[in-house]
Amino acid sequence: MKIQRPNSINVNNPYQRQLQHDETQGKKTYSDQVKISKEALQLQESNQIAKERLEYVNDIKKLVDSGDDKVDHEQVVQKMLNFWGKGT
């Protein structure tokens, strides 16, 4: 035996009501916007740090390729020991 609530015939699903409401008003479209300050635009355009770093890396590459680079092995070992927590 099925028991129905009173006035259950006229009750609409709330989701259906929302759909009907959206269809009658039309859909609104939203888009994301990003605003970049003038200072940020200048930093992007200048990119001076990247240029200096590239020059520095190229200079090191030239030294390594030519064999003129001098590495202080004692200093390298000391820095490794300090990094791993065993330095004095």
Image (spheres, rainbow, N blue to C red):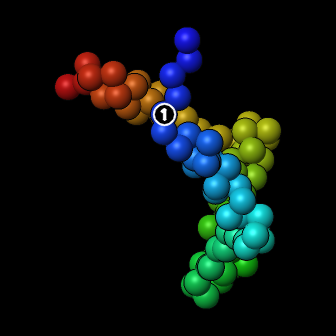
User: Where 41 falls versus 59 (above or below)?
Assistant: below
Query: Within the image, what quadrant is residue 67 found in?
Result: top right
Q: Amino acid type of disc 1?
A: Arg
Q: How many marks?
A: 1
Rendered location of residue 23, percent (x, y): 77, 64
**Residue located 56% across and 40% down the image:** 8
Q: Which residue is mark 1?
A: 5
Query: Within the image, what quadrant is residue 53 found in?
Result: bottom right
| Residue farthest along the bottom direction in this orientation | 38
Q: Is residue 46 left or right of residue 10?
A: right
Camera-side residue: 41 or 14?
14
| Residue farthest along the top direction in this orientation | 1
**Residue located 75% across and 52% down the image:** 58
Circle 1 SS class: loop
- Res. 54 visible in picture: yes
Rendered location of residue 79, percent (x, y): 37, 31
Could you classify mark 1 by the number of other residues whose Cα lies within 10 Å: few (under 14), some (14-19), or many (20 or more)?
few
